[in-house]
Image (spheres, rainbow, N blue to C red):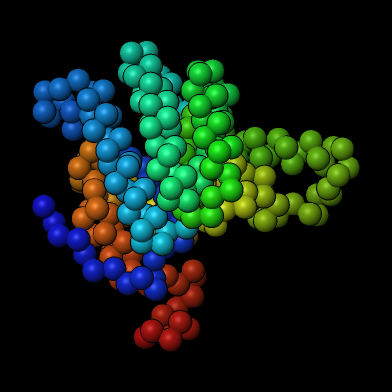
Amino acid sequence: MVDQQPIDPARIPTHVAIIMDGNGRWAQQKHRPRLYGHKVGVESVQEIVECASEWGVKVLTLYAFSSENWKRPSVEVSGLMGLLKSYLLSELSKMLKNRVRLISIGDTQRLPRDVQEVLERTIEETAENDGLILNLALSYGGRSEIVQAVRQIASEVLAEQISLDEIGEKLITDHLYTAGLPEPDLLIRTGGEARLSNFLLWQASYAEIYFTDTMWPEFRRSAFSQAIAEYQGRERRFGRTSAQLGSG
């Protein structure tokens, strides 16, 4: 196991987004059912949330269930929904103790009604917390998010609430699920794949992207610190040169 990497507390990314990939493949490698991988993956969620809160990350967005995941076998989908509900119920007291505020993005109306109710109740009960914002992307897809934003803006134009001249990047940003949140500084994908998979397509324009072969069930404190350390070693130029930043 890799030891925890030294982290500069002055350069912690404000917003970390994670594509939690590899649960099913990890379980299959161990000749266990895919749902076993998801269950162990919940332990990684618990540890990474704890680390993010401890290290001063302000927003942690977890790609928990994509809009495409509904295509998976019904037994797996049902199991994932059960794990989500159990996680929310079991972690509420810890969220309250650690001042974690839960929010969610995505088409959550597609979730089973009992899961919706637990999600809504957890969001409501943690709404006043002033620590880490834990943002769960559920039934989420980046393209559909942009489509719904365009539709909403178009309806406001038709209603003469805004003019065409007012449409710009900020207006679109303000109509996304993530309105009011800072854009991700660091986007991590576990599991060895190197793609965004329809995750935060608009918001991740300038995110530092970190791909790792580590499967999500094994992505714990040491692996997270390694991702943060690599982020801190990168130069974020946002279109400028190193000379303009005074670093070379």
Residue 138 x %, y %: 48, 32
Q: In terms of depth relative to the viewer, which is nearer, 241 or 199?
A: 199
Instruction: Report the number of discs.
Output: 0
Q: In terms of depth relative to the viewer, which is nearer, 107 or 86?
A: 86
**Residue 120, quarter of the rendered image:** top right
From the viewer's perspective, tell me whether residue 121 is left or right of residue 175.
left
Image quarter of the C terminus: bottom left
From the viewer's perspective, tell me whether residue 206 is left or right of residue 229.
right
Residue 2 x %, y %: 13, 56
Residue at 86 percent of width and 44 percent of height: 161
Residue at 49 percent of width and 70 percent of height: 239
From the viewer's perspective, tell me whether residue 93 is left or right of residue 228.
right
Residue 243 x %, y %: 43, 85
Residue at 81 percent of width and 40 percent of height: 156
Residue at 50 percent of width and 42 percent of height: 102
- Vertical relation: 3 (above or below) 49: below
- Asked if residue 192 can be seen in this view, the reply is no
- Vertical relation: 61 (above or below) 240: above
Residue 167 x %, y %: 74, 52
- Vertical relation: 163 (above or below) 34: below
Q: In terms of depth relative to the viewer, which is nearer, 70 or 9?
A: 9
Residue furthest out toward the right: 160
- Asked if residue 237 can be seen in this view, the reply is yes
